[in-house]
Image (spheres, rainbow, N blue to C red):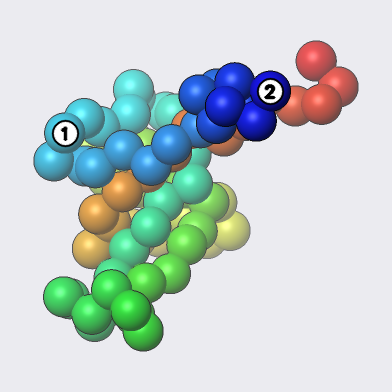
């Protein structure tokens, strides 16, 4: 059973491998300090628009995004 849950789990996607569809809402991982994944990796909710990830709160560009993942479906769907 645990194996099936892992197979269905949403996984991180490298931006160099594939980018989300236009206006796709997602979770992004980005580096505050380039190359410092251990202490400088942060996460934010963003929308992919015109080739950039924009924050939900202020609509600002999220710099240095390395990975993204789609949001899970709502529990109310």
Q: What residue is pinned by disc 1?
A: 17
Q: Is residue 1 visible?
A: yes
Residue at image x 31%, y 38%? 13
Decide if residue 30 is on the left or right side of residue 71: left
Looking at the picture, how far across and down is residue 75, in whole percent?
Answer: 82, 26
Above or below for 33 versus 44 = below
Q: CA distance from mark 2 to mark 1?
A: 29 Å
Query: Taking 58 as reference, is 27 above or below it?
Result: above
| Residue at 33% over, 29% down | 20
Q: Residue at x 41, y 51 (%)?
A: 28
Q: Quick one: label 2, few (<14), some, or many (20+) residues within 10 Å?
A: few
Element marked by disc 1: loop
- Dot 1 crowding, Cα within 10 Å, few <14, some 14–19, many 20+: few
Residue with the most extreme right position? 76
Q: Is residue 36 left or right of residue 49?
A: left
In this view of the protein, which residue sits in the foreground, 25 or 71? 71
Give x and y (percent) for residue 59: 46, 54
Q: Quadrant of residue 12?
A: top left
Q: Quadrant of the N terminus?
A: top right
- Whether residue 50 appears in this view of the structure is no
Which residue was labeled with disc 2? Answer: 1
């Amino acid at each position: 059973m645990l194996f099936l849950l892992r197979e269905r789990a949403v996984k991180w996607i490298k931006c160099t491998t594939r980018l989300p569809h236009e206006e796709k809402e997602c979770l992004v991982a980005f580096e505050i300090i380039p190359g410092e994944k251990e202490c400088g990796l942060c996460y934010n909710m963003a929308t992919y628009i015109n080739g950039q990830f924009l924050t939900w709160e202020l609509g600002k560009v999220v710099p240095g995004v390395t990975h993204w993942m789609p949001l899970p479906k709502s529990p109310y769907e």
